[in-house]
Image: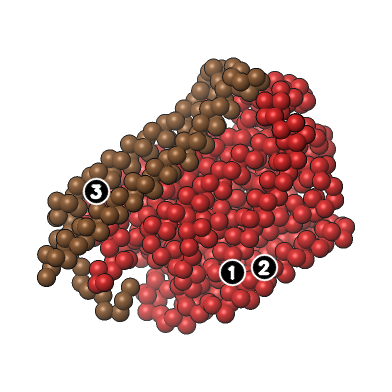
Amino acid sequence: MGNQQKHIDYDKIAQLDSFKQLVKKKNSFLWTLTAIFLIAYMLLPVLTSYTKILHAKAIGDITWVWIYSAGLFIMTWSLAHLYVAKAGKYDKEAKAIIAEYERGQR
Amino acid sequence: MSFTAVFFFVAIVGLTLVITWWASKRTSSASDFYTAGGGLTGWQNGLAIAGDYLSAASFLGIAGAVALFGFDGFFFSLGYLVAYLVVLYIVAEPLRNLGRFTLADMITARFDTAKVRGTAALSTITIVLFYMIAQLVGAGALIQLLLGIEYWMAVLLVGVMMTVYVLFGGMTATSWVQIIKACLLMLGTVIISFLVLAKFDFSIANMFTQMATVTEHGEDYLNPGLRYTDGLDTISMLIALVLGTAGLPHILMRFFTVKDAQTARSSVIWATWIVGIFYILTIFLGFGAAAFVGKEEIVTANAAGNMAAPLLAKALGGDILFSFVCAVAFATILAVVAGLVLSGASALSHDIYGQIIKKGKISEKEQVMAARIGSITISIISIVLALGAQTLNVAFLVSLAFCIAASANLPVIIYTIYWKRFNTAGAVTAMLTGLISALILVAVSPNVWGPEGKAIFVGEPLFMLSNPALVSVPLGFLGGWIGTLLSKEKADEAKYREVDVKANTGISVQDVSH
């Protein structure tokens, strides 16, 4: 942050179509995936508390509950990387929006 | 106490003091003190987050819980890990884009009042103190056991060390203590896991087959249900774990130590990998302890199972590995409590003193002085409380801290970023409802009231869940919603657009002028 910060007209940026689109895209991505991983996660205690289906053996003596848990680990890592890849794209769009706004200011 | 044990302890204390001395020369402004000048790289901050997060409760507690209860002990690992997705998806970026030093800074990006800041500081300090008492009481018991010194001496030792790091080295020293601790912890855990796996001929299938017979529980050991028998309580606990991390002050604070949202993201990725690998290895620690140490010896050393991992190290690697693991556990406690002191001090000195009492009219020098005084204050309060809490069973305090973080902090963070109509009254009621409902529900829960004296008081609990998140998190969200709708105050929409633009583009952090 420099000493002589320019005044930023936030309303103007908020009104840009490109900005509105970015926010819409971003939010629908974020909340869809958040809902998915929270459901996948909360389903585990529901299944273990109210059913016995995860008690069955899957591989040798390893029961399904461990496989499900391993799945949650893999899900966490995958979704973390998916997010970063997506966010990288959104960053580019955000830069373009700032550039568009700056052009409009001149 | 053996020579090797003393050697490892002295080495860790010496190393961390050298770092503190080095960091102290780089700590001159408030921003250096609270956020290491915002200059940490992604991997550094990622390791520091992991070091801050993997508390003794994770290392010693989960290993012990898996050893004693099989799968049920592993539930915590799942919750703690998946929580990082909530942090990454919802909190990390906007927080970095909007905030400066504290959670309150971020909320007041939208609502410019002392009330909001004061309430946020109150919830931060409450969480920090509960978390800290749990850590210090655990530390006292552990070091008492390891070094054979008195409980009060052990608490003072840890307390003085953490104060020294924070006081002289600020966030730079604290971060590096956390980074080193994360590396040592991973090293220790990998070595023990390798030794455990070698005992099972490097076959995970073989390990599970043998584990189905070695404990008193038989095949049940490999399935859930040994520890958590009440479905709602299990669900409630898992909600607190997954949503609480995103509201923990010492974790939130770690996002101000990087320069932009991109680095914040990359640090969460690092943290997710390290923490994930660590939690997978807790299976080996727990299974190994159950198989090669045995329940009796684990419970004799510590009823909660906290000595499982050190005892396993002794069984597999003798005195040297035992001493190393004990020293790592010690470093773990130091790193976590130092991070807690800093986040408590930031709420006390920056939010309450600097911004509310002094209304932001405070020189750089006074800010640093206030930060140091705040650190000492938080340290002294927590040491005194920990000394008084020796005989209490404080294990539930950590889950209470997670629950308050999930109920008081998370709703207000989400509303601030995503809800246009949200207003000052809503922010205050959201935080207060979450905080107070969590406190009251725990105060009347089985943690505090038990018919046979296993809890703090003898009597019937009024609320049956030992973790109230299932009720208090929705209450926090509801409180914010009702508070917003009932107040006559109109939301400042221009301010919301500013927050929305900043959070989504990072503008003004990156600065448009270049």
Residue B375 location, quadrant = bottom right
CB within 8 Å, label 2 to label 3? no
> Where is mark 1, residue-wise?
B173
Mark 2 chain: B
Q: In this view, does B488 lie to the left or right of B231?
A: left
Under circle 3, the secondary element is helix
Image location of residue B141, percent across then percent down: 75, 52
Mark 3 chain: A
- The residue lying at 58 percent from left, 28 percent from top is A66
> Where is mark 2, residue-wise?
B16
Q: How far apart are marks 2 and 3 (CA)?
A: 44 Å
Mark 1 chain: B
CB within 8 Å, label 2 to label 1? yes
Q: The red chain is which one?
A: B
> Where is mark 3, residue-wise?
A23
Q: Considering depth in this image, is A96 or A47 the residue closer to the camera? A: A96
Under circle 2, the secondary element is helix
With respect to residue B477, does A16 lie above or below? below
Q: Which colour denotes chain A?
A: brown
With respect to residue A74, does B137 lie above or below? below
**Quarter of the image with the N terminus of chain A in it:** bottom left
Image location of residue B325, percent across then percent down: 75, 51
- The residue lying at 56 percent from left, 43 percent from top is B276
**Quarter of the image with the C terminus of chain A in it:** bottom left
